Image (cartoon, rainbow, N blue to C red):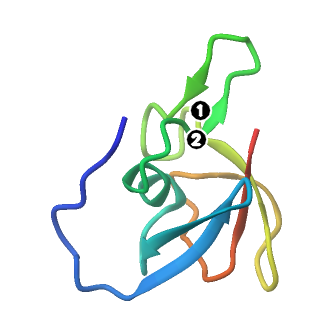
Amino acid sequence: MTAVRLLDQDRPVLTFTVDGMELAARAGDTLLTAMLTAGLGHVRTSEFGDGGRTGFCWMGACQDCWVHVVGPGVNQGIRRACTTLVEPGLEVIRR
């Protein structure tokens, strides 16, 4: 699934990494939005062996978009990609 940005094309561009790949996002993007508009097919891999997961509810209720976030000046740990904003230099590790 690739999301297409229709609005907010003029917001500043930020860079962050996912599994070591540098990706671009727009200021104010959530990790979920940034990862899907960058063309990543999934946010995490299911622990039940049924493939990639992309998030289900997009509002922080389903727990289907958990990622591990690290980086300077951020609250590190397991976070929901749908409610965590992209920060410059943020590192995301898909689970």
What quarter of the picture does the C terminus occupy? Answer: top right
The residue indicated by pointer 2 is 43
Mark 1, secondary structure of its residue: loop
Q: Amino acid at mark 1?
A: Asp
Q: Position of residue 5 (x, y in %)?
A: 24, 60
Q: Nearer the viewer, residue 85 or 40?
A: 40
State whether residue 17 is above or below residue 55: below
Mark 2, secondary structure of its residue: loop
Q: Position of residue 88 (x, y in %)?
A: 61, 83
Residue at left offset 60%, top offset 78%? 87
State whether residue 24 is above or below residue 83: below
The Cα atoms of the two marked residues, 2 and 1, are separated by 9 Å
Q: Amino acid at mark 2?
A: Val
**Direction front: furthest residue:** 21
State whether residue 23 is above or below residue 38: below
Viewer-nearest of discs 2 and 1: 2
Residue at left offset 61%, top offset 18%? 51
The residue indicated by pointer 1 is 64
Crowding near the residue tagged with mark 2, few <14, some 14–19, many ≥20 C-alpha atoms within 10 Å = many
Q: Are marks 2 and 1 in contact (CB under 8 Å)?
A: yes
Quadrant in the rendering for residue 22 = bottom right
Q: Position of residue 26 (x, y in %)?
A: 40, 76
